[in-house]
Image (cartoon, rainbow, N blue to C red):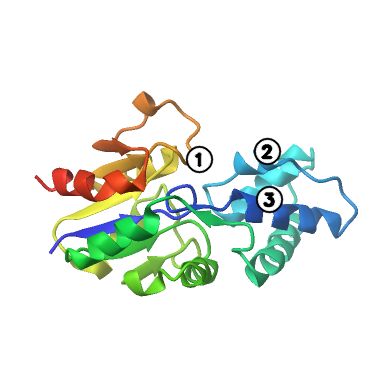
Amino acid sequence: MPGVVFDLDGTLIHSAPDIHAAVNRTLADEGADPLSLAQVAGFIGNGVPVLLQRVMAARHEAPDAARHADLVARFMRHYEADPATLTTIYPGVEAALCHLAGAGWKIGLCTNKPAAASWKILEHFGLSELFSVVIGGDSLPQRKPDPTPLLAAAAELDTDPVLFVGDSEIDAATALAAGLRFALFTEGYRHAPLHDLPHHGLFSHHDDLPALLDHLLI
């Protein structure tokens, strides 16, 4: 029985609008000017603490641990209240996941988004029952691109082999460090050129994913 672990943001869902809204609500609490969607989208991928570090840098704030902790806490209150108001799933995701589950694949999630918010989003879209494990950015001390969270998700799936599906430089580096074959979704939050990211297969629509994963098993 094969297994596959997915990234979440930029791979299964377009979550930048909700993250952007929560960032700007956090800034509005203190009367600060909002940031653009493009700015905030460029900050996504390394987890909430890094997101807020980048928000502080964009506002030319000096590093300050207490200030950073306060922003993280306020952002999480705004975001976790409803993390799926503006978020959408990419076309073909539900069908692809259902196809994989029906074909005997075990499915997991490894994301730098907090686990509770990740489960809430999966439940919102009716996908949570398809996932055997969710490792979030707060599940372990390490976050991607450290391979530890991905290897933990793979271990819980307890299948051979396990493949990884993601969209970014972070995911590519994580897969490489973990020694797992990697399928790269080209329409997510990647910043580097495709040829700069190590991968074993590419896809631009989730309709093509089941066949690609079957090919990567060979």
Question: Is residue 176 visible in this depiction of the protein?
Answer: no
| Residue 61 pos. (x, y %) | 79, 42
Task: Decide which of 89, 114 is in the foreground and name it.
Answer: 89
**Image spot of residue 56 (x, y percent):** 74, 45
Q: Is residue 45 above or below residue 157?
A: above
Would residue 153 be found to the left or right of residue 35 on screen? left
Quadrant location of the N terminus?
A: bottom left
- Going by the numbered disc 1, the residue's amino acid type is Tyr
Asked whether, in this view, residue 63 is left or right of residue 109, the answer is right
Query: Mark 3 and mark 1: span between their CA atoms?
Result: 14 Å
Nearer-the-camera pick, 3 or 97: 97
Callout 3 environment at 10 Å: few (<14), some (14 to 19), or many (20+)? many
Would you call the spot at circle 2 few (<14 residues within 10 Å), some (14-19), or many (20 or more)?
few
> Crowdedness of circle 1 by 10 Å Cα count: few (<14), some, many (20+)?
many
Q: Position of residue 53 (x, y in %)?
A: 67, 47
Asked whether the beta carbons under mark 2 and mark 1 sit within 8 Å of each other, the answer is no
Cα distance between the residues tagged 2 and 1: 12 Å
What element does badge 1 sit on? loop
Closer-to-camera residue (116/178): 116
Tell me which numbered mark, 3 or 1, is placed earlier along the sequence: 3
Which image quadrant for residue 54?
A: top right
Q: Inspect the image, locate mark 2, and give the three-letter code of the amino acid beneath it.
A: Gln
User: Given the image, on which type of amino acid does mark 3 rest?
Assistant: His
Secondary structure at badge 2 equals helix
List the residue tagged with mark 3. 20
Circles 3 and 1 in contact, beta carbons < 8 Å: no
Instruction: Please give the residue where the numbered disc 1 appears in the rendered image.
Output: 189
- Do we see residue 215 in this rendering? yes
Residue appearing at x 71%, y 58% in the figure: 22
Residue 35, picture quadrant: top right
Q: Which residue is mark 2?
A: 39
Position of residue 159 relative to residue 187, above or below, is: below
